[in-house]
Amino acid sequence: LQVWELNLMELNEIVKALKTQQAVSVEDGIQVINKHNPDFIHGEIDPIVIQDQMKESKTGTNETIDQATAIMPDFSDSEVARQFALIMRQTMGSFNVDISEGIETKVQKINGPHGEIPIRIYQSGAINKAKPAIIFFHGGGFVGGTSQVTENFCKVMAEQLEGIVLIVEYRLAPEFQAPVASDECYAVVKWAHEFASELGINPYQIAVAGDSAGGNLAAVCSYLDRQQENNLIAFQALL
């Protein structure tokens, strides 16, 4: 408990810094806001990322990490690529806890261009008015990761936002090659906008976000939205 209280204090300090330490610029007519943690030094790897990498190098996130090989597999062989992806998936993710309060969770599937798409919906408080929403795409190099890894993070976002957060369980490579993942992610954006009233979402306050590969997918969704002139996405956050 003391350890998590300390971490929560550190988290609050980081959140406070993120609110005050930022750089704003305009690129191609779009406002871009860069937020950095307090220890950030331009041109260097984020210290928090380095700490996590050092921790994983000592303990690993899963015992299957020992099965990894230093020799690059022949990814032109689809079966080799699939087996490598299976091992990679088992090494991804790290221990985290749920520090949110009062978050309602819903699990459902929606129709997509390549079949049903599983999604998770996190809602803060009762829906007595239309709320802002974030559609979040998990990372994992397009071959791994799950909504479970980022679930607690998204619950906290829903709580702090006092809104709604959706996580998309998009299909992974190599079993499903590009553009399947981006097709499914943008399909969820369109679905959230279409059914905004039923979901309690303000259709003019829909954001996309993601970490690592998920950030790439968020950027692709924003690009598709702009190219198709749908104007469904009001904001994007790339982690």
Image: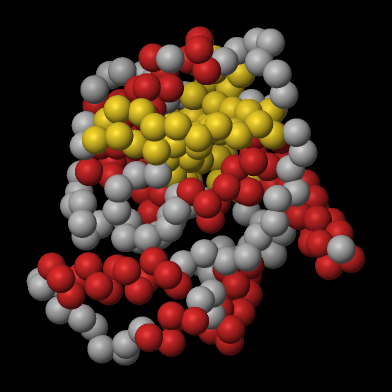
Look at the picture and state if 183 lies above or below 75.
Answer: above
**On-image quarter of the N terminus:** bottom right
How many labels sit on residues?
0
- At a point 50% along the width and 35% down the height, the residue shown is 107
Q: Is residue 234 left or right of residue 47?
A: left
Look at the picture and state if 139 lies above or below 78.
Answer: above
Q: Position of residue 239 (x, y in %)?
A: 51, 51
Look at the picture and state if 126 lies above or below 160.
Answer: above
Q: Position of residue 147 (x, y in %)?
A: 48, 48
Residue at the far left: name it: 76
Query: Is residue 178 at least partly visible in the picture?
Result: yes
Q: Position of residue 67 (x, y in %)?
A: 38, 86
Query: Is residue 236 at least partly visible in the picture?
Result: no
Q: Is residue 152 left or right of residue 38?
A: left
Give 6 or 78, whichever is nearer the viewer.
78
Rendering quarter of residue 156: top right
Question: Which color scheme is applied?
Answer: secondary structure
Q: Position of residue 52 (x, y in %)?
A: 60, 72
- At a point 46% along the width and 67% down the height, the residue shown is 92
Give 96 or 235, whichever is nearer the viewer.
96
- At a point 22% along the width and 68% down the height, the residue shown is 82
Q: Is residue 49 left or right of residue 12?
A: left
Q: Is residue 89 left or right of residue 7?
A: left
- At a point 43% along the width and 87% down the height, the residue shown is 66
